[in-house]
Image (cartoon, helix red, strand yellow):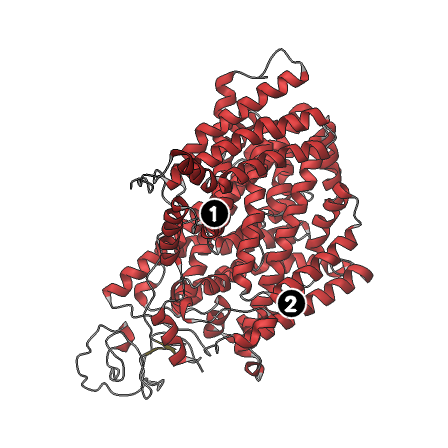
């Protein structure tokens, strides 16, 4: 699959289109960071620490989430597939957590960033990333199609991706003409 | 019961001497041999006068219709969301982490068995529903009608009590301070109004539950990643393979019934697997595509007329069988990757949380060991909070509240769906109401009763019958395994009946659930806890 935008549009408009397409992934990543920060705040942790978690975890997760959408739009990922997304987050999720640990250590004034060896930390985060990946995809697949349908009149990148979602949904759709006709014939 | 008698125009062929027949244009299902194929076109479509049918039991035969083409097997959204929403509940978030704290992570091999059995049950439940577009309740009635009435009554006895709401609403009260009765009653009314206004209830609910489950899965992963470590995760995972580990204390009168309940509640419990067949139908899986979907009360009059029975596809047509295999791949992905995987992921995250708290404060286990269910919920959250950071306790209650919301939405819909289905097809005179109206009737009946009980009565039901309800809930699981064996092996055409291995696993599941239940009852005088 090739990148959908090959027309001689300006570089700025092309970046804007991809940025717009990236929003659902950004939103899911940001929600994950805000969820962690919200729980921290409810639990009575210092506001500075909660804000640090929101920014240093939510920020990278949002960035990686957005990058996923761009990769999807450029055809590097197929719509709705699980395994490539799991591999993607197996790299990105530990990285986001590492950034968060570093930021939290700075805010708390700790000299050591991690309480365990780096390899152990990364392996643990990579294993939990599978859960995160499925949750991310689950939420993304709910948000992205609605968003893409909304922006596709003004955004060719979104139009191309929306088209792929429609193809995907067509194969999932339950009401086929033959089935509906047969049902009408047989209804009691 | 004769499950292989197929005739034309619904006229039984039993006892009729075989007549020379013209060669049909398309292969017919096995029992159609010898029957008059005229009146059916090349695709098995009926004419006004005669049509090809599949006869299963003494109920109305199923006309032959084309099987829709299966969607790609790799997908992320489907009816599994209902099973995950109903299945990821107290068992995964509370009961199993508690057992791990008390007996060690090695006890999780029983959870592995419980969830794996449920995944196979899910696959076998889907077989009948996808082949016919009928619910498993209808299938049970085709075998022996009282079987279906048993489930009709059990559903009312077990699920009419709003006890499942109280844990979630209480957790919300701990976090927000809102009195739990207020949030529970408001929640119920909100569910009723939203479901009433919905055009197609299934679509709305699939969207809402997907968002909730997505947040739950993302949230548990992130929080477990924040507080756990590799050692917690390693012991959680390796514990799943310590087959045969059963400490002496686990078979004591106190803990064995709890263990039985925890195994039964690993994944969807009670009748939730049976309701899944109705969600498959509304999703349009397999022959469910031929059945109209349930609408909200406000749009009930827009519903297409509901056939009085399901349909069968031509199982001797290789093209149809190829499509059937596609549907089996589709539902297998649902069962193994989405249901099994997500249930496992959520419970691993919760167990990592529990292990992290125990690592920080070894006294946690002592506090948890002594509590009753509600007290133990407090104790668990309290001890989480004491173990290093208040974050644990709040996290625990946040997740319990979210799980309570999922369970409420899922149960209200599933109960109403199941009861409406049985009422519509088997209560005389009920067909003059549409199934959507019957759904609305059961939904609002459940809400009205629930509000009354929450305000004036015991949420879990009268204390005197609690044990009976707990017994019935687990008994239903053993019973539906037996029903599943009967329905799949007696009412389906041979080419699509389950093989030896699925039958053996479902048979084992029946013995497993019923055996442990009755052992618990007779050895300790206690049903599941």
Please say if B121 is above or below A30. below
Q: Residues within 10 Å of mark 2 (few under 14, many from 20)?
A: many
Q: Residues within 10 Å of mark 1 (few under 14, many from 20)?
A: many
Subunit under mark 2: B
Give the percent coordinates (x, y) of residue B360.
67, 23
| Mark seen at residue B443 | 2
Tell me the quadrant of the picture where the N terminus of chain A can be found. Answer: top left
Disc 2 secondary structure class: helix
Q: Residue at x 49, y 23 (%)?
A: A122
Give the percent coordinates (x, y) of residue B305.
48, 78
| Quadrant in the picture for residue B191 | bottom right
Judge from the rendering whether residue A65 lies leftward or rightward of residue A163; answer left or right: right
Please say if B518 is above or below A66. below
| Residue tagged 1 | A144
How far apart are the two marked residues, 1 and 2, measured between alpha carbons?
32 Å
In front of the other: B95 or A71: A71
Disc 1 secondary structure class: helix
Q: Residue at x 59, y 49 (%)?
A: B265
Please say if A184 is above or below B337. below
Which dot, 1 or 2, sits closer to the camera? 1
Give the percent coordinates (x, y) of residue A75.
34, 40
Give the percent coordinates (x, y) of residue B469.
67, 60
In front of the other: A93 or B331: A93
Can residue B307 be seen here?
yes
Q: Residue at x 27, y 72 (%)?
A: B30
Please say if B362 is above or below A74. above
Subunit under mark 1: A
Judge from the rendering whether residue A178 lies leftward or rightward of residue A101; answer left or right: left
On the same chain, marks 1 and 2? The answer is no
In front of the other: B478 or B73: B73
């Amino acid at each position: 699959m090739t990148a959908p935008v090959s027309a001689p549009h300006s570089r700025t408009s092309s970046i804007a289109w991809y940025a717009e397409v990236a929003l659902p992934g950004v939103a899911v990543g940001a929600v994950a960071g805000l969820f962690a920060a919200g729980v921290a705040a409810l639990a009575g942790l210092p506001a500075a620490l909660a804000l640090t978690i929101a920014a240093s975890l939510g920020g990278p997760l949002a960035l990686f989430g957005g990058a996923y959408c761009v990769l999807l739009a450029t055809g590097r990922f197929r719509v709705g597939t699980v395994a490539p997304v799991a591999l993607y987050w197996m790299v990105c999720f530990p990285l986001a957590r590492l950034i968060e640990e570093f930021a939290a250590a700075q805010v708390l004034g700790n000299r050591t960033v991690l309480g365990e060896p780096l390899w152990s930390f990364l392996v643990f985060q990579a294993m939990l990333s599978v859960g995160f990946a499925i949750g991310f995809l689950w939420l993304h697949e709910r948000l992205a199609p609605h968003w893409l349908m909304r922006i596709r009149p003004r955004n060719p990148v979104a139009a191309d991706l929306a088209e792929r979602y429609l193809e995907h949904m067509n194969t999932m759709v339950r009401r086929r003409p033959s089935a509906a006709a047969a049902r009408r014939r047989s209804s009691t | 019961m004769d499950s292989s008698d197929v005739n034309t125009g619904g006229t039984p062929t039993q006892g009729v001497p075989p007549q020379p027949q013209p060669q049909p244009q398309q292969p017919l299902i096995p029992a159609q041999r010898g029957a008059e194929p005229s009146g059916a076109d090349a695709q098995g479509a009926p004419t006004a006068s005669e049509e090809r049918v599949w006869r299963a039991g003494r109920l109305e035969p199923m006309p032959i219709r084309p099987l829709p083409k299966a969607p790609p097997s790799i997908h992320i959204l489907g009816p599994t969301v209902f099973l995950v929403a109903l299945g990821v509940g107290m068992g995964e978030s509370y009961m199993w982490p508690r057992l791990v704290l008390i007996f060690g992570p090695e006890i999780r091999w029983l959870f592995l068995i419980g969830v794996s059995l449920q995944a196979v049950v899910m696959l076998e439940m889907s077989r009948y529903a996808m082949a016919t577009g009928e619910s498993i309740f209808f299938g049970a009635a085709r075998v022996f009608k009282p079987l279906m009435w048993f489930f009709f009554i059990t559903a009312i006895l077990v699920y009419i009590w709003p006890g499942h709401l109280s844990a979630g609403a209480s957790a919300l009260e701990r976090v927000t301070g809102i009195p739990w009765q207020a949030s529970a009653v408001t929640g119920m009314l909100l569910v009723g109004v939203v479901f009433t206004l919905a055009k197609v209830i299934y679509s709305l609910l699939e969207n809402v539950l997907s968002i909730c489950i997505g947040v739950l899965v993302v949230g548990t992963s992130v929080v477990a990643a924040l507080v756990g470590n590799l050692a917690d995760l390693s012991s959680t995972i390796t514990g799943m393979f310590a087959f045969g580990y059963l400490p002496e204390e686990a078979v004591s009168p106190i803990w064995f019934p709890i263990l039985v309940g925890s195994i039964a509640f690993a994944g969807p419990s009670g009748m939730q697997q049976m309701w899944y067949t109705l969600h498959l139908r509304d999703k349009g899986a397999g022959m469910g595509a031929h059945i109209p979907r349930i609408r909200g009360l406000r749009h009930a009059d827009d519903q297409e007329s509901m056939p009085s029975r399901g349909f069968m596809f031509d199982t001797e047509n290789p093209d149809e069988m190829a499509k059937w295999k596609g549907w089996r791949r589709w539902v297998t992905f649902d069962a193994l990757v989405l249901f099994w995987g997500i249930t496992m992921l959520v419970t691993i995250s919760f167990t990592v949380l529990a292990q992290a708290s125990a690592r920080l404060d070894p006294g946690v286990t002592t506090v948890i060991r002594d509590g009753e269910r509600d007290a133990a919920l407090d104790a668990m959250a309290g001890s989480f909070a004491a173990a290093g950071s208040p974050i644990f306790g709040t996290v625990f209650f946040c997740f319990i509240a979210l799980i309570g919301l999922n369970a409420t939405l899922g149960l209200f819909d599933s109960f109403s769906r199941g009861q409406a289905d049985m009422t519509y097809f088997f209560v005389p005179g009920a067909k003059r109401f549409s199934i959507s109206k019957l759904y609305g009737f059961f939904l609002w009946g459940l809400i009205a009763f629930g509000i009354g009980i929450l305000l004036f009565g015991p949420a879990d039901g009268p204390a005197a019958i609690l044990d009976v309800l707990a017994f019935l809930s687990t008994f239903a699981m053993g019973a539906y395994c037996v029903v599943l064996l009967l329905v799949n092996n007696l009412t389906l055409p041979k080419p699509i009946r389950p093989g030896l291995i699925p039958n053996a696993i479902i048979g084992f599941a029946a013995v497993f659930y019923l055996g442990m239940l009755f052992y618990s009852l007779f050895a300790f005088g206690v049903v599941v806890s």
